[in-house]
Amino acid sequence: EAGVAQSPRYKIIEKRQSVAFWCNPISGHATLYWYQQILGQGPKLLIQFQNNGVVDDSQLPKDRFSAERLKGVDSTLKIQPAKLEDSAVYLCASSPPPAGGEQYFGPGTRLTVT
Amino acid sequence: DAKTTQPTSMDCAEGRAANLPCNHSTISGNEYVYWYRQIHSQGPQYIIHGLKNNETNEMASLIITEDRKSSTLILPHATLRDTAVYYCIVTGYSGGSNYKLTFGKGTLLTVNP
């Protein structure tokens, strides 16, 4: 079974530029999550999708971050414009139905904002 | 979600059992205890979860106290590849955002040769 795929693996941008991350979840997984992990901390949930609908985006900085999950499969997370404090690893995870706490994580995208 | 408390770091000798404690004194009746680990430069990996009974799988055992206020993850024969940050998370059904995972800083387990 293929795991959660993410791209790119690394990205370096200058502040005020925009960036997008892509995630392809495990086939059949209805729920998709985006997390932000700052160095030395645990992952923090940014947004949760159930199929193509948003379930929880309470911790997403909506003035600069946006995410979509078209057709309930792939998802894209965008930052525009980026700030220095956005430097982090962005992790995508998915989970199968029924609802539970078992999530499968991708390898992450390491973003460096200079 | 209930909060958990874990030691910042632990050491273990290769081949010995690693016992990682977690306190979750405010856990509610419908909340589960989940354990994840994160090896350096990888995404977190699910290990095991339980409600009140002890659980075992191919990776680890989970021992939950009778009052459910604490638990211990046991890696029976630790190897160098088990060196990772281990996260204890308490979660359950909470309406729209079911089983939300709130990660703390976890315990850095270092397995020494």
Image (cartoon, rainbow, N blue to C red):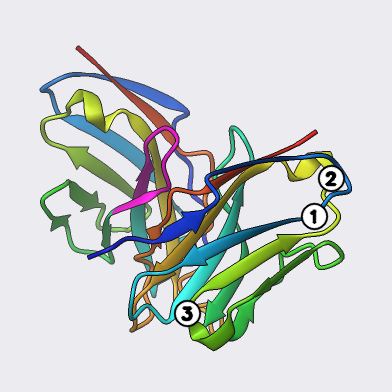
Identify the subunit bearing mark 2.
Answer: A
Mark 3 in CB contact with mark 1 (< 8 angstroms): no
**Gap between marks 2 and 3 measured at Cα:** 28 Å
Q: Residue at 34% of width from left, 65% of height from top? A: A102
Numbered circle sitting on residue A83: 2
Q: Assign the N terminus of chain B to one quadrant of the image.
A: bottom right
Q: Secondary structure at mark 2?
A: loop
In the image, taking residue B56 as reference, residue B73 lies left or right, namely: right
Occupied quadrant, residue B89 = bottom left
- Disc with the residue nearer the chain's start (1 vs 2): 1
In the image, taking residue A57 as reference, residue B95 lies left or right, namely: left
Q: Residue at 33% of width from left, 58% of height from top? A: B68
Q: Residue at 28% of width from left, 60% of height from top? A: B49
Numbered circle sitting on residue A73: 3
Circle 1 is placed at which residue position? Answer: A18
Share a chain, discs 2 and 3?
Answer: yes
- Residue sitting nearer the eye, B27 or A1: A1
